[in-house]
Image (cartoon, rainbow, N blue to C red):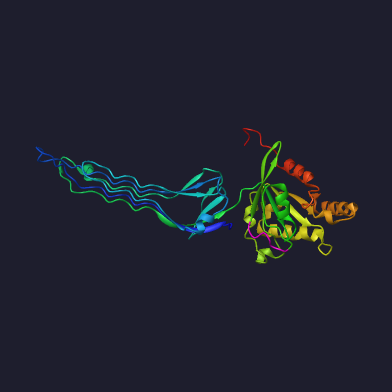
Amino acid sequence: MAFVDEAKFFVKAGDGGNGCVSFRREKFVPKGGPDGGDGGDGGSVIIQASSRLFSLIDFKYRSHFLAEKGTHGKGKRQNGRKGKDCLILVPPGSIIKDATSGETLAELLDALSIFVAARGGRGGKGNVHFASSVNQTPRRATSGKAGEERWLRIELKLLADVGLIGLPNAGKSTLLSRLSAANPKVAPYPFTTLDPQLGVLQLAHHPPIIIADIPGIVEGAHSGAGLGHQFLRHVERTRVLLQVIDASDPAADPFRQYEILAEELSRYKKELLDRVRIVVLNKTDLFDDVREIDRLRQGLASRTGLQVIGISALTGEGLEELKAGLTENLPVEKEGSS
C-alpha cells in the first residue's frame, strides 16, 4: 500500500435548518397562537487523530468531506433534528493548514486530539419566538445559517523516537528489519525505499521505541537531487538520529558520507544538528581485519565528536551495543514528570 504524507481536501459543514411559521389549529381553539419550531443546527466537520492510522492513504480516494444539514422546524413546536457531524480520522502528527494562506490551523500530535475544521450553521428560529403583546400572530421565522466551508491541506510528520538517515544502499532497511518486525524492501540497488517505513523496537525493560526509516538522501538533496528533502519532515520530532554509514565501499570515504548527511540536515533545518546523533558504521562483516574497523570508528569519533558504533545489520554484529546506545539516549520518563 502506498504511503501518503500530504493531501489537499475540501470540508463543508451542514447548513442549519429553517425555522417554521405555524399556528395552532385545534378544535374549539379558533385563535391558536404560533407554534412553529426551530430548525436544527448543521453538523460540523471534525478531524480526530487516531493511533490506528499511520498514513494519509484515505485522502487518495476521497477529497470532499460534507457534514449533514439540519432539518427544518415543524408545527406543534417540533424542532428540526441536528445534522450528523462528519468525522475524519488522521494519524497522530498531522498538521492542518489553510490551503489558500498556508496558515497552520492545528497540530494533532496525540491520539484522540481533535480539531473542528468547519462549524455547522445555526438553525433558524420558529415564529413562536416572535410572539409579543402587540404581535400575537407573527408570520416571521428565520432561515438557517450556512455551514462553514474551505479547502485545507494536511501534512503528516511521523511521530518516531529514532530516525534512520543515510545515503542510498547504506543498509537502513536491513537495519530496521533487524531491530523490529518491520519488513521493508531490501535490494542491492539504490532507492529501494521510496516511502518512509516504521518499525517498533521491543526491549525487555524499556518502553517500545518507534523507528522511522527515511528514504536515502543524496548530495544535493536540498536542490531536488534524488528524492530531495520531501521526507525529512518525518525526523523533525525524533529524539535520536542514526546516521547510517556504508563502511564497505573503499571508494566511499565514511567521513565524506557523514559530511553529506550533516550538510543536508543543516540545509533542511539547522536545529536537527543539535539532536542526539549516533553514527552507525554498517557492513562491518565485509572486513577481514577487525583492527581496520576500530581504526575507522576511532577516526570518525574524533572528527565528528559523536558516538560511533560498528555493526553488521546483515549478521546482527554490534546490534546489542546499538540498542544500549538507544536506551541510554531515550531514558524512561518517570510517571508524573513533564
Which residue corresponds to the image point at 54% horizontal and 43% vertical from the top-left? 111
Which residue corresponds to the image point at 64% horizontal and 55% vertical from the top-left? 196
Residue 231: x and y in percent read 63, 58
Report the side of 28 relative to 36 (left or right): left
Report the side of 164 relative to 284 (left or right): left
Query: Which region is colored magenta?
Result: 189-195
Seen from the viewer's position, the closer of residues 96 and 76 is 76
Which residue corresponds to the image point at 68% horizontal and 57% vertical from the top-left? 185
Residue 274: x and y in percent read 71, 50
Count of numbered tags: 0
Q: Looking at the magenta stretch, what is its main secondary structure?
A: loop
Residue 234 lies in the magenta-colored region? no
- Residue 103 visible here: no
Placement of the C terminus among the 4 image quadrants? top right
Placement of the N terminus among the 4 image quadrants? bottom right
Which residue corresponds to the image point at 21% horizontal and 42% vertical from the top-left? 128
Residue 254 lies in quadrant: bottom right
Q: Is residue 219 above or below residue 54?
A: below
Residue 245: x and y in percent read 77, 56
Residue 331: x and y in percent read 70, 39
- Residue 145 visible here: yes
Report the side of 4 relative to 26 (left or right): right
